[in-house]
Amino acid sequence: MRPRIFPKIVDILLVENHSGDVRLVEEALREGKLLDGLNVELAADGQEALDFLYRKGPFADAPRPRLILLDLNLPKKDGRDILDTIKKDVELRTIPVLVLTTSDSPTDLAKAYELGANGFVTKPDDLDQFFEAIKDLQHFWFDIATLPSENIA
Amino acid sequence: MIGRHRKQVLVVDANPGDIRLIQTILGAPPKIPFTFKSDGRQVSQALDQLARSASLPPIDVHAVTSAEAALEYLHRKGDYAEAPRPDMIIMDLALPKMTGLELITSIKADKKLLNIPVVVFSGSDAPEDIREAYHRKANCYITKPNDVDEFAKAIKGLERFWMAVATLPAPSKD
């Protein structure tokens, strides 16, 4: 496989296998005015997410993402396992991980925070609310919160 | 989304002025400008803002000025025997004896407390502090703005994300 080319800074690694949801998140991010400059990269399953973070195979040149949006139910490797792996890794654990899922199960919620998720967002069914949620998320994490500044090695 | 029951927020900050500001801003209704021109767009924006703020739960703010007091509060010791469990903690790093970083560690090492989101709201913008706070599992880090309007904006944005967008962990039945 040929190595992929990445921008220098990846603001968001979106780990999501439903292409409809990928589309919605990207559209919502684009709608948020400040957003033009945000680079979003996609990992379409759990294994790809880990390959991206550990720079394996085609992801050899992948930069460290500033924030991760993680779905829970993913093919190949479950979102909970990925969360656990990231938060147990001394190097990766400082990257904020927001769980973004259709699940509103209290078990998933409790487990995610226990594993060290930085936040848990249930995707609203309503399209307008979905857009609002993503815009509020983006505004909070990119305009208000301070993300760790890693030296992009 | 979620329940409309009152949310409990614990603020840990050595500066009483900052505590006061946070208390005033959190849960306060949005300011609606009275000088409408008969401009439909402005009116609908204002209504939109009102509707959005109506989706926020009412908040009770509890405040302590040291990490030691925060731990007493969280473990319901002494004066805090009846204290409600916070749904979220907003804390400064610069605290008198035990430091904020130490407080994060001790919250996140405690099985009963670790799932309470900890938002660091700190005057420091030193990269080491930011990195260290995330490393110790703070849920997020905000650099406290000096400007009062920016300060208010930060608190409002924080409220919006954590109280309306994110789902907070359910209160444990302890």
Image: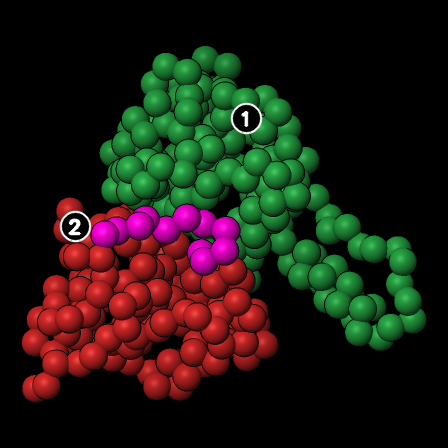
Chain colours: A red, B green
Residue A107 visible in this rendered orientation of the protein: no
Are tags 2 and 1 found on a single chain? no
Bounds of the magenta span? A141-151
- The quarter of the image holding the N terminus of chain B is bottom right
Corner quadrant of residue B44:
bottom right
Q: CA distance from mark 2 to mark 1?
A: 34 Å
Question: Camera-side residue: B152 or A78?
Answer: B152
* A37 or B154: nearer the viewer: A37
Q: What secondary structure is the magenta-colored segment mainly?
A: loop
> Callout 2: 10 Å neighbours few (<14), some, many (20+)?
few
- Give the quadrant of the C terminus of chain B: top left
Coordinates of residue A88 in the picture (x, y in percent): 16, 49
Above or below B94: residue B130: below
Q: Residue lying at the far right in this picture: please name it.
A: B38
For residue B76, side relative to residue B103 (left or right): right
| Residue A52 position within the rendered picture, expressed as x and y whole percent measured from the top left | 17, 70
Other-residue count near label 1 (Cα within 10 Å), few / some / many at <14 / 14–19 / ≥20: many
Q: Quadrant of residue A128?
A: bottom right
Residue tagged 2: A91
Point out the frontmost of discs 2 and 1: 2
Q: Amino acid at mark 2?
A: Glu
Residue under circle 1?
B63
Q: Secondary structure at mark 1?
A: strand
